[in-house]
Amino acid sequence: MRILVTGTAGFIGYHVARRLLRDGHAVTGIDGMTAYYDVALKRRRHAMLRESAGFTCHEFLLEDAQALADVFTGCEPELVIHLAAQAGVRYSMENPQAYINANIIGTCNVLEQARAHPPRHLMLASTSSVYGANRSVPFAESQRCDHPLSLYAATKKATEDLAHSYSHLWNLPITICRFFTVYGPWGRPDMALFRFTANTLQGRPIDVYNNGDMARDFTYIDDVVEAVRRLSTTPPRGPGESDAGASPVAPCRVVNIGSGRPVSLLAFIESIEKALGTPCIRNDLPMQPGDMPRTWADCSALRALTGFTPDTSVQAGVEAFVAWYRTCYATTVASPAAQ
């Protein structure tokens, strides 16, 4: 298939593109190479993808509507996987405009091109953060998501609503993937696992918010890729589908992609200590604005649609990350995550 993937120099985008290339597809990638975190890491990911003859990449921001239109016209994608976004809860309080530009304007431009060049299936990345202040767990796709706790979450929920409207108006088959705390090799330096590993190896303390009284549905990257791959061949058919996240009026559905097994932050830190063979020095801090106390995915819709449930244990996933980190970064030299 001809597949367009946005955000191919990003963490999830890189892994998804690599899997699609390995499966024999022609992949066109787009990435803006923003400086939110180490651009050198992004370029290393793209360099590895370029080793495949089936990969073509373009470097521009999705806010550039004409550049995006040119790519769609040139590749006429059968499948679009839109993963590019401005991520990060705390950074959204420092630079809100980046989230409006990348997440809302950029996504709207992707939807406009999908309308002009309809693919068989459009997949859109969202986040567990959209569940916001919901207290009923596990989080199910049928729950209302009306109380976001951060601007990041608000912009991602806005993209979900935009996608649904385009699906309804233009009969576009769209799957919205709500990712739950994705981690693993080639992960983002701003995420906890990367920062905790880097700081501990350098003898620095790690910042532990809410004194560690938090839980996350950590989901290993290979499981996320497998879920996306399987969902890509199962586009929503339209109203009348019975799965939890299906729209009653459009060929649009929401699907949680998580492990379904929340892990406390303190247990996660213990897994890192075990993998590193050294204790972490904790700097306990209060809860940060915009953070959610816990996330927990109801994965029944994913299982019903694909027959797949993520099953990589946190210990195995953390050990894989630590092995990658030791290979890519000398422990005596500061990595991009050092604080």
Image: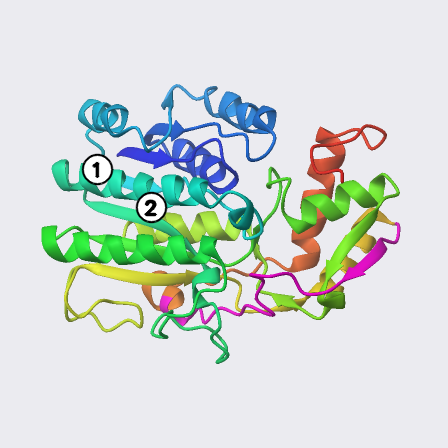
Q: Amino acid at mark 1?
A: Glu
Pointer 1 or 2: first along the chain:
1
In this picture, residue 22 sits left or right of residue 231 = right
User: Residue at point 19% right, 30% down?
Assistant: 76
Q: Is residue 162 left or right of residue 86?
A: left
The answer to whether residue 282 is magenta is yes
Closest to the camera, between mark 1 and mark 2, is 2
- Pinpoint residue 60: horizontal percent, then vertical percent: 37, 24
Q: Circle 2: is it few (<14), some (14-19), or many (20+) Cα within 10 Å?
A: many
Percent of width and height locating residue 215:
64, 68
What is the quadrant of the C terminus in the image?
A: top right
Mark 1 falls on what kind of element?
loop
Magenta span includes 175: no
What residue did someone put label 2 on?
A: 104
Q: Nearer the viewer, residue 286 or 144?
A: 286
- Examine the image and state in which quarter residue 314 appears: bottom right
Q: Looking at the image, which residue is at 29% across and 55% down?
A: 175
Residue 10 x, y percent position in the rendering: 49, 36
Q: Quadrant of the N terminus?
A: top left
In the rendered structure, the answer to whether residue 233 lies left or right of residue 249 reads: right
Which amino acid type is shown beneath numbered disc 2?
Ile
Range of residues picked out in magenta: 278-301
State left or right for residue 47 relative to residue 105. right
Residue corresponding to mark 1: 78
